[in-house]
Image (tube, rainbow, N blue to C red):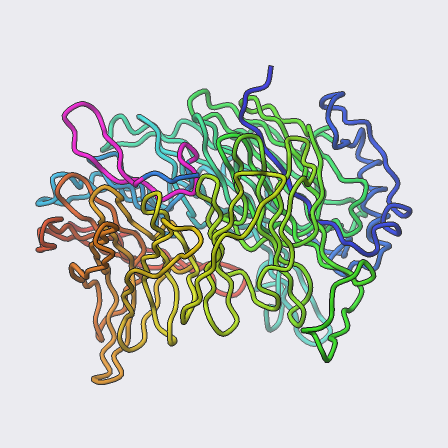
Amino acid sequence: MYSKSVVLIAIVLAASGVTAGISTIAMIGNGHNDPTDLMPAFSSYSELSRFLDGASSNNNPLYGREVTGGMPDTNQQQASLGSPDYSRTNVQVSGVDEADTVKTDGEYVYIASSDCVTIVKAYPGDNLSAASIITYGILAAEANATIEHASDSQFGMTVSGLYLLPGRLAVIATAYYWTNYYGGGEYYALGSKAEASTFAYGGYTTDRTMIFVFDINDIGNPSMLGSFSVSGYPVTSRMQDGTVYSISQQYIQKRDDGRYDIPKAQNGSDGGDLPAEDIHYDPETNDPGYFMNIMALDISKLKAKSISIVEGWSSTIYMSTESLYLTFAKWPETPVMIMPDVQSRTLSQAKPLPTTSIYRIDVNGTHMRVAAKGDIRGVLADQFSMDEKDGYLRVAAYNGDWADRRNVVYVLDSNLTVIGSIKDIAVNETIQSSRFVGDKLYLVTFRQVDPLFVIDLSVPTAPKILGELTIPGFSTYLHPVDDGHILGIGTENGTLKVSLFDVSDSTEPKEDAKYVFSGYAYSSSQYEHKAVLFNAETGLLVIPASGYSYGDGNYTSGFYAFDVSASAGAITMRGVITHSNNSYWADCSRALYIGEYLYTISDSIIMANELSDLSAVDSMVYHEGTRYYGPYYGVVESDVVSG
């Protein structure tokens, strides 16, 4: 029996050229992993090679090139009995965690820098101190000891995110192995600079997505329980019921010996090339330039399973409690004519448009199989463009080109068949943000003004627009407050803006309140939802922001705290926690609370303030130094913690 957890993989196919792709790339393989699998798998390396050789004949410049070498949580969680309330990562779907650079368990704060992980004793907030640090050296030593790589390769690593479970910490990182080309005159060498005469140019790079699992029961001495890796750089990941689903992209490359680089998966030093039977493909794909590698890792059991899918470029990824959707935007190869009168022109089947095919993969722990397939026309903007409710998949997409853009909403049934749609929404405007809340979709488009659409999805076969609000600027992120109010974070007159929308009357939405920053300001919360801290019960909103005052020329960066009152229809500035001024620039990233304290984290500093009045309590430098790596930079190391 399969669990209700489902992985859906959306693969974007071109609306034009598909026939040619099918004739060139014949269907091969028999789905060896599972006879009920709808996506075939290869039976041997020779089948895989023939498939890729056929694809490379379609004039794909990236392919076969020769190389050498729902209603969200309120961000509040109760720890053990007697422990204080604390916030957690602002995720799209309750019950589906997302990797983030900052996590907390209500006592400690875990902070991922680019080259290490610092564990800070945070509660109570009047005595911040470093409990321990997982250094770059610890992670790099494990990677170099377990990953297969060329002996003359150079190495670098970046920590990208964390997952936290009781007693365990999962660290997601990217390991880079590269070999420079050096040359001078007619002489070229591959390897160390001493072998060449003058300069380095480019390099052959191999990426690995790694997950390190640590036992943190002894918080002062985290011990590594194991490491897991798969080829490619990490795109994103999700965690549900203790299983992490990590998605990576790997360029398909053909080496000097004529063989393709095959995805590799390892548990420590065990493993190697994925078996052909674990590499799937879409027979209709005519531009397969990448391996999409999915690693499912059970954090508690320390067991992992990886599969790979030959496809195009990966874009939007979304996971509900039922499904994980991976999309691959594929644009038509045929150039699109820009018509002089785009307002009167209507789209036709003769005009090439992007098309998205959707595959559903059932998941039972670490076991995965493709179980359904469907198609829509259009491209998705981001993960908030998709939502699953009561077995229906709802999608907001756009198609057409920049001169003739059409927005559309689809509803698909459990077989991924389109059963309802609304077409030609806000013609020639672009989707800036969307949020599904229950049976409603709130959609923001923009060209010169900011329309907010309220769309009813209660009848899946007949979605309809209920109301529309037009105001200056636009919102790039929407966040539910309660059943009748939505927060919007975006832009107005070239600066940062926070809006409170009243949508209690779906036919007449209105902007109850707004806060527009003076001068020029921007925030990572405009494009990164995990930078938003919001508690619907207390109305606390905290976002990082950087601003420039035109009057005195001062530049500051820090965290802005607001009180949001849906009943009063008001947004009130509570205060600002400054992390930098003109003499120092800080990359402000996350805010969280534990009990009565508000914690704000920038690239090197963590601060604790009273939640009641934002008065300063304590601060510490948790990280100093920067690590650069790559074929052009070399490596500079520094891991310093003070407190």
Is the stretch drawn in magenta largely helix, strand or loop?
loop
Does the rendering let one see residue 115? no
Does the rendering let one see residue 404? yes
**Residue 75 lies within the magenta run:** yes
* Residue 433 point in image, percent of width and height: 48, 57
In this rendering, position of residue 224 left or right of residue 346: left
Residue in view at x 10 percent, y 49 percent: 612
Residue in view at x 11 percent, y 51 percent: 618
Q: Is residue 561 above or below residue 321?
A: below
**Residue 92 lies within the magenta run:** yes
Q: Which residues are magenta?
A: 74-96
* Residue 345 point in image, percent of width and height: 73, 70
In this rendering, position of residue 5 left or right of residue 44: left
Residue in view at x 64 percent, y 38 percent: 412
Q: Nearer the viewer, residue 546 or 136?
A: 546
Q: Nearer the viewer, residue 327 or 215?
A: 327
